[in-house]
Amino acid sequence: MTKVKTGLSRKLLTRVLSVYFVLTLVVTAGQILTEYLNAKNHIIGELQTLKNTFSTSLTRAIWELNTPQAQSIADGLIELPIVEGVQIRDENGSYIANLGKTSVLEIAPVSSGIMHEHKGGTFGYTFPLIFEFSGRTSNVGDVTLYSSFAIIFERIQVGVYFLVGNAILKTAFLVFLFLNAFRTMLTDPLGEMTRQMNEFDLERLEESRLVVKIKDQNELMVLRDAYNKLVDDLIDFQSKLGGAQMELRDANRKLDEQNLMLEQEVARKTATLSRIMLDLEQQRDELIEKQSALKKENENRRRIEQRLLDKNKELADSMESLRMAQDQLVESERMASLGGLVAGIAHDVNTPIGVSVTAASFLEEKLKRLRLDFDEKKLTQKGMGTFLDDAHQTTSLLLNNLNRASDLIASFKQVSVDQTSEAVRDVNIKDYLREIIQSLAPKLKKTEHTINVECRENMIVYCAPGAIAQIITNMIMNSLIHGFEHINAGKINIIIRDDDTQIYIDYKDNGRGLSPEMLDKHFDAFVTTKRDKGGSGLGTHIMYNLVTQTLGGKISVESEPGSGLQYKIQFPHHRVSTETEAT
């Protein structure tokens, strides 16, 4: 009884007082925070007032390089109650004075007032020192004044103690008031009701009613009346229970009669069930015959499945043959690309070599004429000068065209050898791109298209250069053939960068772009928009295989109709030292 009474009162009182305590704590904390912020703003205002008081004299002292006077002003400022630290810096950020509790300033001399917080509860106000001379102003440095939480607390200490004392006093009075009210209105009535309920006796229901004096109309009175009504209901129930027992005896008699009738019905149902069992046995025999037929059908199905497996094996062999044919087509496409490069280079080399042959023939004719004049003693100084001028121009023309042919052949030689080899070596990627673009010059010389390469100098990449050459060549040729169709002056930007582990190639043109349907199938084999003009559809498929297999990287493509096409390539950066190669 005591536990129930004490527990209910204590829980209810604890919850009420807990809510009040939390509210009091929050309100008191808010009032203390308000006092703190008001005091802090007041101190900040005093610091700003100090600025107007001594900034003129301190500015002049720094302007006149009077360091002792500046330090003297700092000593006077540190003596003020609200100032715990002073920092004076010149226009270069060097400290002229650094007194009291300060922090290292990582900012340059400021041009306007700044408030900043620091560790340990300190905060500072930094303002510039502006010197005016002949209508012009000059920033000669800045001053930082520091104050702290301790100074603020000294100002609000009395108010804080008053707020805390007031909260404690109100809480204590409320606890006393609640305890008295709970005891009078809840604890004592509940205790009396509990005692009377424990004396409940089923044999003496008339004496088990609750008799508790409750002054107010409240829930306890409702509980008492409800309990007394329950007792009255129990009295009525006991009277009704006697009549129900008589009715139960009559019902048992009728139940015996019903049991007899049920036994007769069960016997009849049992006979019916026997007939049903015979029918089920007959159906079971028929089911066994059907299972036998089903087994034969399953055997036939297994034979059909075996035939399907044989057909699948034949289909797999056909797929392997198709794969080998596809690999041969890919290799043929690479050779065709190299063949086109050979034809372009041969045509481009033919022009400077033809000019060189013509110049050599012209020079030979001039030499014969000079020899004839020399033999016949008709050689004059003017004739010799004319010959020397012609010979100089002819040899210059001959040398320029032979150098041009040599550059074309050298670029083609390196690129073609790399494209037919999978050897791995160190490559200066920027120089190598120049050679690739030089080898494609025959494809570009009759157009106004431009290629821009952005790459840092001396970027050395250890890779298979043939893969790089094939990838760059295919991307440029795709732009020329597909992207720049009906475009006179296309632009291609190639950006190459690297980090410690990866090489990144960003290729972009301003061509006509691709539709979403073609973009989804861009790297599939035999997909091309130039099927009727001899396109094989293997160029991008070869690029994908070279990037993912030969270079061990990944490639993605982005495009929209009318907005050009962009490839993003990424592969590992393998650096091999000279010592490792020698080993």
Image (tube, rainbow, N blue to C red):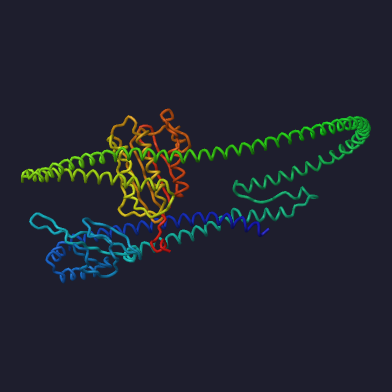
Residue at the left extreme of this rendering: 381
Rendered location of residue 143, percent (x, y): 22, 63
Query: Depth check: 508 or 214 in front?
Result: 508
Question: Residue at image x 68%, y 54%?
Answer: 194
Q: Is residue 196 left or right of residue 23?
A: right
- To which quarter of the image does residue 315 belong? top right
Q: Quadrant of the C terminus?
A: bottom left
Question: Residue at image x 79%, y 35%?
Answer: 295
How many numbered marks are there?
0
Q: Is residue 121 left or right of residue 356?
A: right
Rendered location of residue 377, percent (x, y): 7, 45
Q: Quadrant of the N terminus?
A: bottom right
Rendered location of residue 517, percent (x, y): 45, 32
Question: Residue at image x 67%, y 55%?
Answer: 192
Question: Residue at image x 70%, y 56%?
Answer: 195
Residue at the top extreme of this rendering: 532
- To which quarter of the image does residue 369 belong? top left
